[in-house]
Amino acid sequence: LWDSLKTSRRADHTGEPGPIAVQIAGTEPLMMAEAALYNIDRGAQIIDINMGCPAKKVCNVWAGSALMRNEALAVAIVQAVVQACAPRGVPVTLKMRTGWSADHRNAVTLARAAEQAGVQMLTVHGRTREQGYKGQAEYDTVSAVKAAVRVPVVANGDIDSPQKARQVLQTTGCDAIMIGRAAQGRPWIFREIAHFLETGSLLAPPLVAEVSRLLQAHLQEHYALYGEWTGVRSARKHIAWYVKGLPGAEVFRQHMNTLDSAEGQSQALSDYLKTLAEHSDRWPSPSVEMAQEALA
C-alpha cells in the first residue's frame, strides 16, 4: 500500500456517484487482500483486480498483465481478495488482456480459473501485453472468454465510436463494453453510444457552449483536487485531449503549455472556445477536421 498524497486523494470518494469501484494492483496475495479491505473501509463497493496494465513499471514487478505469465500466482491473488471481500459483501472483478504475447494467449484458461475462484465479472482487453496499445485489438479471444464462462464479460479495446460499440457487442456476445482512451477529451461518448444502441441513430455533436461549461467545471475540480501548481500542469494533457484535431489546436496547445496559473489557463481556454464558437455552435468532429487538413 503506497503511503502517498496521490493514494490518499484517490481513496477519498466524497461526492462520487456510485457504485464506487476501485482497482488494485500488486503481486502479493495477502497485501492485495489488505489493499481491498483498505479501500472497502473508505467506501469501495466493487474491487477490481488489475491484470491488464501493460506499463513496464508495473510488469517489471510482476504486477498488472505480467501476472498472466504466472497463472498460479494470479489465481492465488484472486482467491485471497475474494476471501477478504466476501464477508463485507463486496464483489470482486478482474480486468485482463488476451495474454502475455501472441504465443501465450491464455485469457480463456485464466478466466475459467478466476470464475471458479469467485470473480463475479471479467473485462478483457483485446490485445496482449506484448502489443501494449499498438496494432489493433482483436475480439476472437474476447468472444472465446465469453463462451467459456457464466459470469458477465466486458469487452475492451479500440471501442471509439457508437458504431464500433455495436459491432463489438454483436460479434463477441459480451454483456457490456468498457471505454478507455476514447473518453479522454470526449466524455460525451457514453451518451452517444447509449443513444445509438437504443435508437440506431447518431446524436448531433454537443454544443460548444456545453463543452465549454463541462471543460471549465472539469478544470476547477481538477485544481481543487491537486492544488494549483500540480493541477495546472497535469491539466494540460486533459485540455490537449479535448482539443486534439480541432482548428488551431496545435498553436493553442503550445501556448497552454507556457501558462502556470489556474486563472491564466482557464482564461486562455475560454478565449479559444469563443473563437471556436464563432465558426459553429457545434463541437467540431476531429475526424472531419483532420480529414479536411489532409486533403488541403
Image: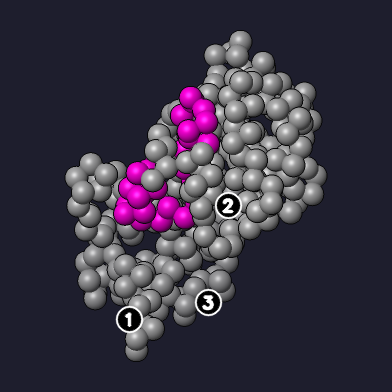
Q: How many labels does the image show?
A: 3
Check disc 1 and give the amino acid type.
Gln
Give the image location of residue 166, x and y in percent.
33, 48
Mark 3 Cα-neighbour bin, 10 Å: few <14, some 14–19, many ≥20: few
Comparing 148 with 162, the one in front is 148
Q: Nearer the viewer, mark 1 or mark 2?
A: 2
In the rendered image of this protein, does residue 131 appear above or below residue 112? below
Q: What is the secondary structure assignment of the residue under circle 1?
A: helix
Q: Kindly identify the amino acid type of the residue bearing the numbered disc 3.
A: Gln
> In this rendering, which labeled residue sits more in front, label 2 or label 3?
2
N-terminal label among 3 and 1: 3
Q: Could you tell me which residue is drawn at 48 percent across and 48 percent down?
A: 139
Q: Position of residue 45 (x, y in %)?
A: 52, 24
- The magenta segment is 145-170
Outermost residue on the top side: it is 87
Q: Distance between the residues labelled 3 and 1?
A: 22 Å
Whether residues under marks 2 and 3 lie with C-beta atoms below 8 angstroms apart, the answer is: no
* Mark seen at residue 292: 1
Task: Give amino acid for label 2.
Answer: Arg
**CA distance separating discs 1 and 2:** 31 Å
Callout 1 crowding tier (Cα within 10 Å): few <14, some 14–19, many ≥20: few
Q: Nearer the viewer, mark 3 or mark 1?
A: 1
Q: Is residue 205 above or below residue 195?
A: below
Question: Residue 254: which numbered mark, if any?
Answer: 3
